[in-house]
Image: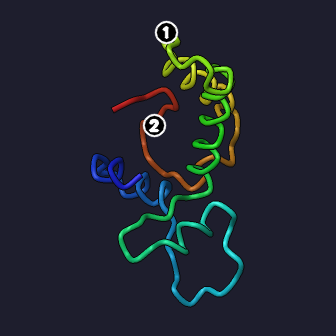
Amino acid sequence: VKKVCKLIDCHSCITSLTENVNEHDYSLPLRHKQFVLLKNQGGLVITSNCVYRIIKESEISFLYHTTHLSNINIKNLDKKIISHVVNKFVLDHTIFKNLSCENVEILERP
């Protein structure tokens, strides 16, 4: 996420990918943040819950298409995973609901 944020010039997009961390927030962090918060010494970026959901679905798709890593030499594996993840979230209005970019399509790539 840190590398992607360097390539993006849209403030709304960057804030949708990351999550602000308050050092004095003593509530129980979400599962995907616990390890990062434990290991963070100031250089790690905390991803948003939406990014976590997309990465988790990508991992599930990767394991499915590779038959749990028994065969990773699959033609167009990246396109299959992207297609699966896009189809999973294309109608999900909770993904990046605070995104306020203009001219944004789900299949639009930089």
Q: Look at the numbered discs 1 and 2 and tell me whether their residues touch, using CB distance below 8 Å.
A: no
Quadrant position of residue 104: top left
Of mark 1 and mark 2, the one earlier in the sequence is: 1
Report x, y in % for residue 42: 38, 76
| Residue at horizontal 52 percent and vertical 82 percent from the top | 22
| Residue at far front of view | 70
Q: Secondary structure at mark 1?
A: loop
Does residue 28 lie above or below 64 as drawn? below
Residue type highlighted by circle 2:
Val
Q: Nearer the viewer, residue 102 or 24?
A: 24
Type of residue at label 1? Lys
Where residue 88 sits: x, y (%)?
Answer: 69, 30
Residue in the image at 58% along x and 43% along y: 55
In the picture, measured across the screen, residue 67 lies left or right of residue 23, that is right
Q: Which residue shows up at 63% across the image and 46% down it? A: 95
Residue bearing the label numbered 2:
104
Label 1 environment density (alpha carbons within 10 Å; few <14, some 14–19, many ≥20)? few
88 to 40, vertically: above or below: above
Of tags 1 and 2, the one toward the viewer is 1
Seen from the viewer's position, the closer of residues 42 and 102 is 42
Place of residue 102 in the rendered image (x, y in percent of width and height, measured from the top left): 42, 43
Distance between the Cα atoms at labels 1 and 2? 29 Å
Q: Residue at x 49, y 26 (%)?
A: 107
Rate crowding at label 2 as few (under 14), some (14 to 19) or many (20 or more) other CA atoms within 10 Å.
Answer: few
Q: Which residue is mark 1?
A: 75
The C terminus lies in quadrant: top left
**Quadrant position of residue 2:** bottom left
Q: In the picture provided, is 73 more to the left or to the right than 57?
A: left
